[in-house]
């Protein structure tokens, strides 16, 4: 998921010493590299070219299915209010499936689940081109990016809402900047200095952090915080 959201291709890499298939995680899933640490034999090996290893890509090759680019969800802007769903709302940013065998095109946007009661059945389950909750519009790219950022333990707590001290423009970092904390960030609009919402110096900007905090103030139930339990991979 991380590699696909940030635009990296994964390949099938085998340890040249023991033959075990290799899986790159965390920092290594978004940085193509040639030197790998095998989880099978515990030794370092070098591949023929820089890449990101993930054995699951072999499933694509074995099925012979042609990968197709997802299309923007045809459903228009969804407007809902939290008070309408006391059981809660779940939000996902879409990312391409590993295997897609359906005849219809895969859709990208913001995927939503809503519940009338806690633990009850899903009322709304679909992907929309954009979503507005309590008059606050969620940007699909920000949602997808934050979903990936939350799965990278090496940048935990470093993704913040950042604003320009001169013009007030919120900062949204994409591409390599979206998973690489840095100091001295500058405003894309006026070149001014950015200020984050926390105390860490090396940070990444995503306005959705502050947007979700504002929405949580009026939530029917306190938003759940799920720890994935991932440990940062060491370089």
Image (cartoon, rainbow, N blue to C red):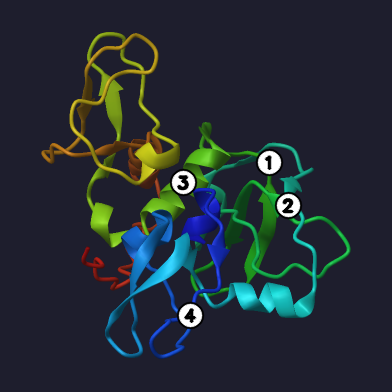
- Res 199 quadrant in image: top left
- Where is residue 175 shown, x and y percent of the image? 45, 39
- Where is residue 25 shown, x and y percent of the image? 38, 68
* Residue at mark 2: 107
Q: Secondary structure at mark 3?
A: helix
* Residue at mark 4: 14
Callout 2 crowding tier (Cα within 10 Å): few <14, some 14–19, many ≥20: many
Choose mark 3 or mark 1, whichever is in front. 3
Q: Secondary structure at mark 2?
A: strand
* Residue at mark 3: 145
**Residue ID at (38%, 52%):** 149
Q: CA distance from mark 3 to mark 1?
A: 15 Å
Q: Is residue 66 left or right of residue 234?
A: right
CB contact under 8 Å: marks 2 and 3: no
* Residue at mark 1: 129
Q: CA distance from mark 1 to mark 2?
A: 9 Å
CB contact under 8 Å: marks 1 and 2: no
């Amino acid at each position: 998921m991380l590699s696909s959201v940030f635009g990296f291709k994964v390949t099938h890499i085998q340890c040249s010493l023991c033959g075990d298939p290799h899986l790159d995680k965390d920092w290594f899933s978004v940085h193509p590299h040639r030197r790998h640490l095998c989880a099978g034999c515990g030794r370092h090996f070098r591949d023929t070219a820089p890449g990101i290893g993930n054995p699951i890509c072999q499933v694509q090759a074995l099925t012979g299915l042609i990968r197709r680019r997802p299309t923007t969800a045809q459903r228009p802007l969804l407007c809902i209010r939290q008070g309408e769903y006391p059981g809660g709302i779940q939000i996902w940013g879409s990312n391409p499936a590993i295997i897609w065998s359906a005849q219809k095109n895969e859709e990208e946007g913001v995927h939503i689940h809503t519940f009338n009661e806690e633990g009850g059945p899903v009322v709304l389950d679909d992907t929309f081109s954009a979503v507005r909750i309590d008059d606050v519009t969620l940007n699909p790219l920000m949602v997808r990016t934050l979903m990936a950022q939350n799965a990278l333990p090496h940048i935990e707590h470093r993704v913040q809402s950042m604003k320009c001290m001169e013009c007030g423009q919120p900062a949204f970092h994409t591409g390599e900047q979206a998973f690489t904390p840095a100091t001295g960030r500058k405003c894309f609009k006026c070149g001014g200095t950015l200020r984050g919402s926390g105390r860490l110096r090396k940070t990444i900007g995503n306005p959705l952090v502050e947007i979700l905090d504002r929405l949580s103030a009026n939530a029917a139930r306190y938003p759940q915080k799920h720890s994935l339990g991932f440990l940062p991979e060491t370089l």
